[in-house]
Image (cartoon, rainbow, N blue to C red):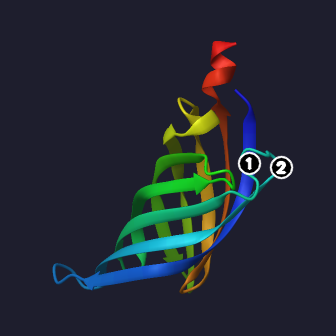
Amino acid sequence: MPEMSGSFSGTTRVETKLRLSDVPGHELRIAEITGSQRSTDDNWNNAGLIYWGVLDLVDGSGTQRGNYVNERANGERECGAFEGKVTTAQGQTTLEGTWRAIFGTGKFKGMKAQGTYKGRMTSPSEVEMSWEGHYELAASRAA
């Protein structure tokens, strides 16, 4: 399977926060983040990324999970899911976890892909991520 890596810078388009009353500092956040991918692999370079995440945090740390879609200029998509941890320490929030492709269209239909991501919030509404993984297009497996 080909190895791939890249980075993503995104901005929060929509976010909702719900403060819970079970323990102090507990909140749920739901957000939509949009941006563009950068990669040396043409299959991901300049793909538009939208992801929807749910964070379950106590004092800024906890879990993150959600779904994403990478869309190319020609309309082909690769969609998947991610999950990981969120850590806030000394005023800096970092993100780390795993992702996997679930389905795609065009040449991404039937692909297999998975990997890891690491990132940080550069402001309350902006995120920077780096990611890596491996993938195999269905056409490659059939050959």
Q: Residue 59 bears which disc, if any?
A: none
Q: Residues within 10 Å of mark 1 (few under 14, many from 20)?
A: some
Residue 123 left/right relative to 36: left
Q: Amino acid at mark 2?
A: Thr
How far apart marks 2 and 1 lie (CA) works out to 7 Å
Q: Position of residue 76 (x, y in %)?
A: 61, 46
Say what secondary structure mark 2 lies in: loop
Q: Position of residue 127 (x, y in %)?
A: 61, 74
From this view, report whether residue 68 is shown above or below residue 21.
above
Numbered-mark total: 2
| Circle 2/circle 1 CB separation < 8 Å | yes
Residue 39 left/right relative to 136: right
Mark 2 vs mark 1: give the one in front: 2
From this view, report whether residue 19 is shown above or below residue 29.
below
Give the residue at the far left of this rendering: 22
Q: Position of residue 39 (x, y in %)?
A: 78, 53
Q: Going 60% across and 61% down the picture, which residue do you hit? A: 49
Nearer to me, 77 or 134: 77
- Residue to which mark 2 is pinned: 40
Residue 38 left/right relative to 57: right
Q: Going 17% across and 84% down the picture, which residue do you hit? A: 21
- Residue to which mark 1 is pinned: 5
Q: Quadrant of residue 120?
A: bottom right
Nearer to me, 72 or 16: 72
Q: Going 33% across and 83% down the picture, which residue do you hit? A: 17
Residue 42 left/right relative to 104: right
Say what secondary structure mark 1 lies in: strand
Q: Quadrant of the N terminus?
A: top right
Sequence order check: which comes first, mark 2 or mark 1? Answer: 1
Q: Amino acid at mark 1?
A: Ser
From this view, report whether residue 56 is shown above or below residue 47.
below
